[in-house]
Amino acid sequence: MFRPILIGFLLLAIHTKGQDTLYIKGVNISKTFVGDSTQIEQRKKAFSIEYLAKGYIDQQLIKHSKNSQTLQLQNKYLIDRVEQGNLNQQLYQKYLDPLEGQSNVNRLTYAFEKIIEHYQDNGYPFAKLSLKNNSIGAEKIRLELQLDRGQKINIDSIHLHSKVQVAPTYIYKQIGLQPGDLYSEKKLQRVDQKINTLGFVRSEKASMVRFYEHHTALNVFLKKARTSSFNGIVGILPDGEGKTLITGDVTLNLHNSFYRGEKIDFSWKRLQKSTQNLQVAFAYPYVFKSNFGIETALDIFRKDSLFSNLSARGALQFLTTPTDYMQVFVQQTNSIVLGQASAQQASTRTTQYGIGYAKQNLDRLLNPRKGFTIDAKVMVGNKAIEKLDTNLNQLDTRIEAQFDYYLPIKKRFTVLFSLLESRMISDAIFENELYRFGGIHSLRGYDEQALSVSSFTRLLVEPRLLLDESAALFTFFNIAFYERDLENSYQKAWPYGVGLGLNFLAKSGMFSFSYALNNNFSLSSGKVHFGFISYF
């Protein structure tokens, strides 16, 4: 929005070129400009602005001829005092008090802009700031402010012109505005950006504010975006014992299926015989239109005939936006050894209580150029250990976090820095409790979930060339440090991988392809990671 700032005098600017000549004698400065009339005007204006900003407001033009002009500057003025006038005391002390004794007019202009922004973000979109009763003394200037706040404006209504069903409360929470709120220029400028980070809905065209005589309305134009997804592959083959073996990797993500912004995630993997992993999660935001949401998750993993793990979590979230929240949760994990336990295995039952924090601040959800995401959890609880007909209880702590930061370099170039951390802290850690990592989502260059560890830290650096809003060509380097700290056994290593890849969105969905080499740097050990997600 245009910010009307009446400073009381004109700011003009400077350059030296060709046969122009600059003379400086004490505090007096003069410059002669030579050339055709158009060139003279351009360079003279630039010169005038530069020195006005330095306090030379007494400027006199001497016209010699059509192709030669001289501008004389006399006396450098300081700002003696800026009278508060009818300005808020707090704003005056913050922005204008420090200007006394300054000669830099640019700082005065900056202070005026910040004051106007304050009022425009707090219900006064038509605020104006001007100077009156200005006086110029011996090399000193005294100014008096005059504030005209204009009419106080509320956003009386928000009209969602939508081609997708969604609860209005969900949109209000995301944009940080709801009917009756004060006008805020800062929030209004970010409405479309915030809408586009939701995923299942996008802005069809720029939102707009309409001012009526007794009413102000915000109009938001929405269209459906394909964010629910499905990808999977299923194989049927003989298991060598005359029976049929079903293997596969299936993932289903549903978003806003019931028009409340809820999420349902389902994942099933069976990449090896007798090894399966089932994960189900459900999140429902803004229960009864409050800022609270709920989340539940279930994770079942079975490893051959060795052990079976079941983990269930229930969480209560406090949401500031649909993607930003704090949560408290309780998690129950049972790990059962099947058959005879080895020295490094034991059945355990762990009950933990935790807190979590998540925040997303991206310019766009798909193929972002700048911004960051944070997702962190800390949980502490009791672990009951059943081993050799004895029961032990120990304190068990887990830390899980991921931080992604997109650093924009050029318009079409960005670098992703990603830090992934998972850590178990306990006096006794058993083989059946370990984290499983490796593969396209954690450590490229290694097979999916090939590494079983008690803690790991992974750093990813990924320069990206953004071909458009949904396609990128990238290279990457990821390195991890992991520990496998078991009873009577300890291992550590620094695995890493390098490679390149391509992501692009087609009508049928998102394709992801990457080729990675690990520590061996052997083409025969290179890993091809290929992914496809079908959006609907």
Image (cartoon, rainbow, N blue to C red):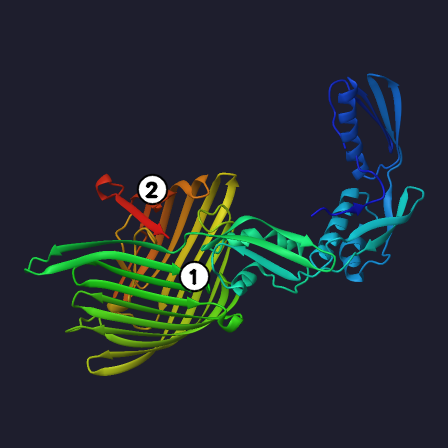
At 79% across and 56% down in the image, what residue appears? 150
- Residue 459 x %, y %: 40, 52
Q: Which mark is residue 180?
A: none
* Relative side of 29 to 469, left or right: right
Is residue 169 or residue 278 the one in the foreground? 169
Q: Which mark is residue 499?
A: 2
Q: Can you name the residue that lies furthest to the bottom here? A: 390
At 50% across and 65% down in the image, what residue appears? 325
Residue 226 in view of the camera: yes
Q: Nearer the viewer, mark 2 or mark 1?
A: 1
- Residue 498 x %, y %: 34, 43
User: Which quadrant of the figure has residue 271?
Assistant: bottom left
Is residue 376 or residue 456 the one in the foreground? 376
Specify which label sits upstream in the sequence, 2 or 1. 1
**Image vertical order of residue 152 relative to residue 296, above or below:** above
Which element carries disc 2, helix, strand or loop? strand
Task: Tell me the distance, in whole angstroms, between the alpha carbons under discs 2 and 1.
Answer: 36 Å
Residue 187 in view of the camera: no
At 82% across and 38% down in the image, what residue appears? 10
- Residue flagged by tag 2: what amino acid is it? Gly
How many numbered circles does the render carry?
A: 2
Is residue 368 or residue 418 the one in the foreground? 368
- Residue 137 x %, y %: 94, 44
- Residue 305 x %, y %: 16, 68
Q: Which mark is residue 256?
A: 1
User: Which quadrant of the figure has residue 350?
Assistant: bottom left
**Image vertical order of residue 256 relative to residue 476, above or below:** below
Is residue 104 or residue 48 the one in the foreground? 48
* Relative side of 163 to 498, left or right: right
Which element carries disc 1, helix, strand or loop? loop
- Residue flagged by tag 1: what amino acid is it? Asn
Structural crowding at the residue carrying mark 1, measured as other residues with C-alpha within 10 Å and reported as few (<14), some (14–19) or many (≥20): many
